[in-house]
């Protein structure tokens, strides 16, 4: 057994590409090894901006042997009456690669057939690796790839060399113009010479001596300890930023931590502007005190141990000073411009060609938000704040700070609103209306922010559907799925009970003047779009598909009610008798559905108690009337679990009815009366869920 080491040496790969690429590289290669029956013990990935590597331990020297059974013709065709092989048997033996004496027979459903066992002892691991490695390396996915020279290959950045060794043997590599062997490169500045790796287990230590820490976890730990120690020496601590730690870890090969400072006058800037200036452009860590206030220091992680680190720090300080001067200029200039002026400027900012400008959008959002304010409460002050927040929501998009730092949209809107005397609730809502900004992100805390967020997102969704820009199976360029999921999470978080259908239809009305579309069809498509998002959310939370489908059929207009129904049905499914209950309910629904083909107005027929032909009919009708009032009362109070358990009490009377009565009686009067009774029960079930969709 030998270890395998593969390193792809490249020009500098973007930090965000490295870890996903390594995970894909490992997954693809290990899957290939399994497919080719090559056993191994363990694997480990390594990476820096200039290399992607994988070390696999204890690979078998060759493929695991396998015996394949090949079926041939029937025995009566393969051998004559004297037991001698026929031409058919000889052809089969030749095809199977065995002698005729090795042919065996076995009994099958069709009779006796010939078969042969073909043993594959397997090729050497080295031979297999030479075949699969080039394909594996250049199948690693990246967000963007490039070509170089006259090669037809694509990779994140040009590949400089390939190191591929199995034990101490170099795996041959036939890729044109890419060096292949057992050489790797050290640190670009501190050890530019190539290094020979004689065996895979030398890799990490030899590179460490060449000022390259290839272990990502080790590099990250050194950075975390280094920046924490540096911050403590200033009397503060690092402002937590795990994403920046991850980025910086994949920007350097040999982390060297240093501390710089800046003029205290820049602390007049909002914290978000100051930290973003340091983080986005320079990848600097901010320092805060015990009261979470920023201190005039920054921590930087360099990639080189310079002779004069003080000179390096002065360089960082000089660059940051220029950045902060720009930020200070932009911020002060923005404060001189009123919201009214900014909103007027939005008339010149295009939202989408068919949907108009950002100014057009905020007019629509304001209208929808005011409707939502009416639907979610009756506080006139709240509606006034909703209206104002919606109107100001996009004003910061034309501010100089947001143009420079787009990630601060909403945040700067909140800051400018506070500076210009807007109500604190309005300012908060301006920032929150973008939430959630990513999958699993924070939701708006305030009711006003939640309303504006829903109004903004539903406007985008409805507008795109009206303009024919709905997502496809593989494409969602406008992020409509993410926004739809955001709306659902906000509604459930705030327990908003307004009608989704009404929200969609009222929003669609805001587009009727400027766009031509089929209102009914578009409304249905958007409603289905939300049902799909809701289904996916609940499946991820562990709900069964048929449980979701059953309650979706009965209720999707009030999302909190829908969720309560689904949870209640999920709970009932844990009961030992649920299967029997579901079968009974489905039987009722199926009979009614079948009868509709013959009579379509059954539900409106009254039940005539005077013609009941069996006590089970009277008993069922009596129990139905008694339980109906309980069920509807509990559903009205939102106590869906109680309603469902009350409903389950009808199982015995329904089964007794079916056992003693022929529903589809030849006497049409009796038949229609029995169908009318079952129809009422089916309608009662249907108020909760469509039980015909439950798998039993």
Image: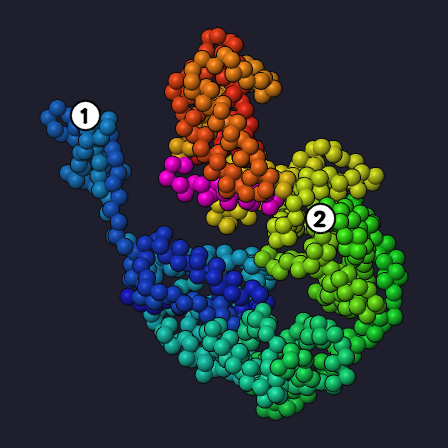
SS class, disc 1: helix
Q: Is residue 95 left or right of residue 228?
A: left
- Above or below, 593 against 210 in this view is above
Where does the image place residue 5, in percent across and percent down from the top left?
40, 68
SS class, disc 2: helix
Q: Is residue 563 magenta?
A: yes
Q: How many numbered circles are shown?
A: 2
Q: Tell me the quarter of the image containing the N terminus.
A: bottom left
Residue 376 numbered tag: 2
Q: Is residue 491 left or right of residue 215?
A: right
Residue 45 numbered tag: none
View extreme (left): residue: 82
Res 145 → quadrant: bottom right
Residue wearing tag 1: 76
Give the residue displayed 49% in from the left and 17% down from the top.
Answer: 674
Which comes before the other along the chain, label 2 or label 1? Answer: 1
Q: Which residues are magenta?
A: 559-578
Mark 2 burial class by Cα count in 10 Å: few <14, some 14-19, many 20+ = some
């Amino acid at each position: 057994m030998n270890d395998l080491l593969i390193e792809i040496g490249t020009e500098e790969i973007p930090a965000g590409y490295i870890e996903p690429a390594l995970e894909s590289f490992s997954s693809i290669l290990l899957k290939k090894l399994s497919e080719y029956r090559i056993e191994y013990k363990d694997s480990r990935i390594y990476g820096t901006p200039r290399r992607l590597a994988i070390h696999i331990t204890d690979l078998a020297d060759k493929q695991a042997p396998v015996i394949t059974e090949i079926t041939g013709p029937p025995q009566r065709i393969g051998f004559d009456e004297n037991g001698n092989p026929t031409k058919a048997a000889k052809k089969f033996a030749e095809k199977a690669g065995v002698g005729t004496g090795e042919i065996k027979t076995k009994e099958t459903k069709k009779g006796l057939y010939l078969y042969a066992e073909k043993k594959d002892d397997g090729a050497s691991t080295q031979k297999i690796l030479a075949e699969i490695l080039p394909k594996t390396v250049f199948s690693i996915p990246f967000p963007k790839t490039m070509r170089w020279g006259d090669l037809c290959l694509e990779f994140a950045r040009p590949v400089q060399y390939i190191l591929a060794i199995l034990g101490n043997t170099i795996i041959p590599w036939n890729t044109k113009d890419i060096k292949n062997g057992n050489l790797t490169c050290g640190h670009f500045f501190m050890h530019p010479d190539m290094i020979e790796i004689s065996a895979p287990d030398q890799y990490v230590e030899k590179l460490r001596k060449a000022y390259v820490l290839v272990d990502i976890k080790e590099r990250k730990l050194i950075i975390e300890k280094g920046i924490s120690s540096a911050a403590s020496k200033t009397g503060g601590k690092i402002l937590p930023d795990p994403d920046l730690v991850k980025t910086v870890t994949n920007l350097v090969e040999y982390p060297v931590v240093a501390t710089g400072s800046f003029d205290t006058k820049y602390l007049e800037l909002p914290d978000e502007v100051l930290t973003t200036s340091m983080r986005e452009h320079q990848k600097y860590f901010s320092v805060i005190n015990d009261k979470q206030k920023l201190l005039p220091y920054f921590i930087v992680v360099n990639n080189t141990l310079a002779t004069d680190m003080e000179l390096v720090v002065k360089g960082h300080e000089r660059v940051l000073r220029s950045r902060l001067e720009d930020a200070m200029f932009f911020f002060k200039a923005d404060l001189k411009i009123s919201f009214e002026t900014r909103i007027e400027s939005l008339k010149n900012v295009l939202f989408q060609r068919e949907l108009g400008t950002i100014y057009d959008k905020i007019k629509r959002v304001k209208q929808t938000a005011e409707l939502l304010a009416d639907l979610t409460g009756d506080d006139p002050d709240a509606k006034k704040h909703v209206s104002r927040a919606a109107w100001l929501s996009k004003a910061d998009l034309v501010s100089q700070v947001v143009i420079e730092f787009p990630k601060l949209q909403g945040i700067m809107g909140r800051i400018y609103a506070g500076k210009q005397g807007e109500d604190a609730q309005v300012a908060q809502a301006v920032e929150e209306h973008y939430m959630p900004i990513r999958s699993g992100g924070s939701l708006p805390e305030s009711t006003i922010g939640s309303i504006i967020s829903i109004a903004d997102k539903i406007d985008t969704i409805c507008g795109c559907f009206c303009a024919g820009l709905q997502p496809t199976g593989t494409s969602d360029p406008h992020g409509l799925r993410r926004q739809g999921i955001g709306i659902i999470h906000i509604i459930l978080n705030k327990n908003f009970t307004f009608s989704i259908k009404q929200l969609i239809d009222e929003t669609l009305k805001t587009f009727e003047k400027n766009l031509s579309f089929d209102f009914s069809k578009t409304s249905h498509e958007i409603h289905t779009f939300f049902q799909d998002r809701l289904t996916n959310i609940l499946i991820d939370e562990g709900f069964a598909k048929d449980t979701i489908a059953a309650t979706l059929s009965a209720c999707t207009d009030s999302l909190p009610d829908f969720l309560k129904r689904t949870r209640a049905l999920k709970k009932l499914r844990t009961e030992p008798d649920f299967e029997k209950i579901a079968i009974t309910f489905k039987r009722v629904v199926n009979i009614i559905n079948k009868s509709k083909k013959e009579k379509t107005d059954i539900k409106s027929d009254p039940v005539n108690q005077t013609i009941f032909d069996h006590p089970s009919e009277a008993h069922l009708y009596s129990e139905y009337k008694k339980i109906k009032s309980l069920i509807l009362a509990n559903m009205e109070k939102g106590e869906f679990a109680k309603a469902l358990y009350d409903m389950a009490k009808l199982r015995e009377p329904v089964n007794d009815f079916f056992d003693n009565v022929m529903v589809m009686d030849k006497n049409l009067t009796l038949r229609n009366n029995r169908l009318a009774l079952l129809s009422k029960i089916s309608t009662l079930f249907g108020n909760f869920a469509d039980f015909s969709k439950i798998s039993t």
